[in-house]
Image (cartoon, rainbow, N blue to C red):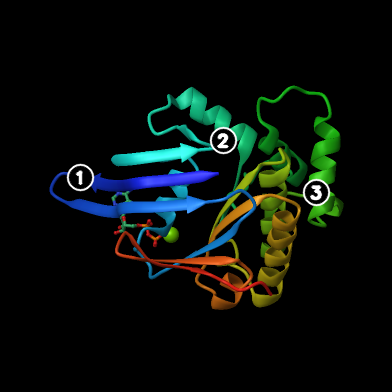
Amino acid sequence: MIALEALSRVYRSDEVETTALNDIDLEIATGEFVAIMGPSGCGKSTLLNLLGTIDRATSGRYLFEGEDITRRDEAALARLRRDRLGFVFQSFNLIDDLTIEENVALGLAYRPGTGRRGAVAAAMDRVAIGHRARHFPHQLSGGQQQRAAIARAIVGEPQLILADEPTGNLDSENGGQVMDILGELNREGATVIMVTHSPAHADRARRVVHMLDGRIALSAQRAAA
Ligand SMILES: Nc1ncnc2c1ncn2[C@@H]1O[C@H](COP(=O)(O)OP(=O)(O)O)[C@@H](O)[C@H]1O
Ligand SMILES: [Mg+2]
């Protein structure tokens, strides 16, 4: 599904240059569940943002389904994100003054209207948040908010789910529920790439990619459970 070739991302400000990703080669096949681990600042979020096309490489190539999308224009990348990708963040990123239902519908932004309501309801039921459809984010627990954010990510039935520390703000019970949902989505065919600091949660993935200083230090395939 994905191939990164000699991918680098350098942040430049007035005086300082930070190499967040340094010459990354990485392949991810359709249907994989990959955990990305490594110390704070090693480039995990930068890598996930590049995979999600919300950031661009400084050099190197990004192939998605065999197509070089490294220099695609922003409109084409926006379509790719809308049609094929789902994002989950550590801090949920729900919009405070929209209801849960309206937040989930954002995951269908700009798609034709038919079937929208049914898709939104199905996504909410999927993560057991349907009974909170008319609530606002602040009326929900952290675990419920993250489940709503997952509903928003999956309502468009993405092929690839990118999750940046999705359990980082949750207690172990709610974190476990989020991991159960991600595992289930993966078993149903979605490719999942997840950043985590939790060894227990990384254990759910079939492959763990360890990063250090902008490089991939180790990519370890796990035996089938
Ligand atoms: N917008 C930015 N401008 C400058 N430097 C950045 C920016 N975002 C991240 N960095 C730097 O890039 C490196 C990798 O950051 P990040 O990918 O967020 O790490 P991680 O997610 O592993 O904690 C860090 O040194 C960080 O300070
Ligand atoms: Mg990060």
- The residue pinned by badge 1 equals 13
Split into 4 quadrants, where in the image is the C terminus? bottom right
Whole-percent x, y for residue 216 in the image: 37, 62
For the residues marked 3 and 1, what is the alpha-carbon distance in whole angstroms? 42 Å
Q: Residue at x 16, y 51 (%)?
A: 16
Mark closer to the chain start, 2 or 1 = 1
Split into 4 quadrants, where in the image is the N terminus? top right
Q: Is residue 81 above or below residue 169?
A: above
Mark closer to the chain start, 3 or 2 = 2
Query: The residue under label 1 is which amino acid type?
Result: Ser
Q: Is residue 85 above or below residue 145?
A: above
Secondary structure category for the residue under label 2: helix
- The residue pinned by badge 3 equals 124
Q: Residue at x 66, y 69 (%)?
A: 175
Q: Please name which of the two marks, 3 or 2, marks the residue nearer to the observer.
A: 2
Labelled disc at residue 81: 2
**Viewed as shown, does residue 6 lie left or right of 86?**
left
Q: Residue at x 50, y 36 (%)?
A: 66
